[in-house]
Amino acid sequence: MRMRSCFLYTVAFVFVATVCAIIAASTITGGNRNASVDRLEELVARYAPPPAAPADPTAPVDAAAGSAPASPATSSAPEAFAEVRKVVESSGTQPDWQGVMELYQGDVPPAEWTDGQWAELAAFVGSNADLLAEIRRIAATDGPLVELPKPLNYDTGLEHLAPARQMARLLAMDTLVAARRGDMDRALVNLEAGLGLARATARDQILISSLVDIAITGIAHHAIRDGIAPGSLDGAQTRELVNALARSYPNEAYTAALATEAAMGRSIFDGIRTGEMPPGIESQGQGDELISTVYGSVLMRPLLNLDEGAQADALARLIEASTLPYYEAREDIRQLEEELAGGLPFLKPITRITTPAIGQTLEAQARGQATVDLMRLGLLLELEYAETGRYPDSLDAVADGMGGSVPLDPYTGEPYRYIPQGDAFQLYSLYVNGTDDGGVGERREGDLAWRGDI
C-alpha cells in the first residue's frame, strides 16, 4: 500500500513538474515569439501597403509605333491582358511561332542571322502587329496584369507570369526588326513597353513575380545590346530611355514582395493555432488536421513558439536586408543562412520550409539593380561619344544624366569598373565573386558587363 502511494506521489510530482516546465517554457518562448512577431508585423505594415491604382488603361499607344487603335475604353488592363494571354498561349504551338522563338532564343546571336532569318522575323512581327499594339497598350498601364485575391496565399495562381515573359520577347523581336530598319522611334516604344511590362508583374507584390520583373528587364537589356547600336539613338531618345530605365529599379517592389511572403508565412502559424490551415500549403486533408492538432497542442507549444519566433525573426531580417545595398547586407545574409541551416532538423520545420532561399533572393535584387545601372550608364556614355567624339575619362561626366550622382556597384560598394579605350570602352560590375575578371563573364560566372550576357 505504501509503495502504491509512493508511486502515485511520484507520478503526480512528475506530472506537476512537467506541467510547470511546459508552462515555464511556453512563457519564455512565447515572450521571445511575441517580440519577433511584433517586429515582423511592423515591417509588413510598412513595406506591403495596398497596391496603388494602375494608370489609365485607355491611354493610346505612341503613334510612332505605327500600331493599331487601342481597345475600347471599357476594357480594363486585366481584362485586356486576359484576352492577349489567350492569343499568346494558343499561338505558342503554331509552327511559325515556334520557329521564331527558336531563332530568338537560340545560340546564334542576331549579328549572325542570315537575311532569310531576318525576313522571317520581320514577316512574323508584321503579321502580329495588332497583337503587339495591344501588348504595348497594356504595358503602358504599368499593371497590374491580373487581379490577384487578397490576401495572397500559397495556392494563389500565377499562371500569368509565363505569358508576360512571352509578351516581353515579342516586344524585343519587334525592337530588333525596327532597329535594323532604322526606325528608332518604334524600337524605343517597344523598349519602354517591355520595361512597363516588367513593372506590371512586380505589382503582384509576391516574390516570384519580382523575379520575373528582373528577368523581363534582362530581356530589354538584350534587345538594347543586340538591336540598338552605339550612337543610333539621338540625345532626346537616349535620355527618354535612360529615364524609363530609372523607373525600373527592383528594390522597392522586391521589399514589398518579401513583406507579402512574410504575411503568407505568418498565416500558417495562425492556422495552426486556430485549427484552420491556410490553403495551398503542402499538407492536405488529414495532414492539415494532424499538424494543427499535434503541433498546435499545449504540449508542443514551446516548440511552436520557438518555430514561429525563428520564422518571424528570419523574415524580418530578410526584409530589412532588402532595404540595404547588397554589399552591406551580404554578411548578415550569410549569418542568417548558417543559423537556419544549423540545429536539429526537427526543430523549426515551418521556418525551414517557408523562408525563401535567402542568398539567391537578395542577390537577384542586386543583379536587377546592376543591370539597370549598366544600361543607363552605358547609354549615356555612348551618347557622350556621339556628341563629343570621345569617351569621357570617368563616369562623373554622365552624373547629371543619372540624376546628379553615379551609382555604386551593389556587389562591392565601389564604383563600377569603367575603362575608356579610344573608340570603345568597358563597363562592368564585379558581380557575385567580387573579383575583377576584366569585364568577361557569362551568366553567373565572372563579371556582369554592359552589352554582355546579363
Image: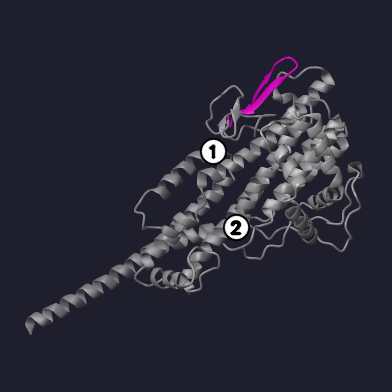
Residue furthest to the left = 2
- Examine the rendered structure and indicate whether residue 405 appears above or below residue 136: above
In what element is the residue under mark 2? helix
- Of the pair 432 and 317, the residue shown nearer to us: 432
270 over 361 or under it: above or below: below
Going by the image, does 150 lie left or right of 110?
left
Quarter-wise, where is residue 280 in the image? bottom right
- At label 1, counting other C-alpha atoms closer than 10 Å, the crowd grade (few under 14, some 14-19, many 20 or more) is some
Secondary structure category for the residue under label 1: helix
Looking at the image, which residue sits at the far front? 95
Foreground mark, 2 or 1, reads 2
Instruction: Name the residue: 61% across, 32% down.
Output: 409
| In the foreground, 351 or 443 | 443
Of 356 and 339, the residue lying toward us:
356
Q: Marks 2 and 1, how far apart in space?
A: 23 Å
Magenta part of the protein: which range? 413-430
Q: Name the residue under label 2.
A: 260
Question: Which image quarter holds the N terminus?
Answer: bottom left
Visible residue check, residue 125? yes
Which mark is first along the chain, 1 or 2? 2
Q: What residue type is labelled 2?
A: Thr
Residue 416, visible in the rendered structure = no
What's under tag 1, amino acid-wise? Glu
Residue at 88 percent of width and 34 percent of height: 183
Q: Residue 229: within the magenta?
A: no
Residue 52 percent across, percent down from the top left: 73, 57
Residue 122's label in the rendered image is none
Q: In which quarter of the image is residue 117?
A: top right
Q: Residue under label 1, please give it.
A: 328
Image coords of residue 215 (percent x, y): 66, 43
Locate residue 422, reporting x and y percent: 73, 14
Give residue 229's quadrant in the image.
top right
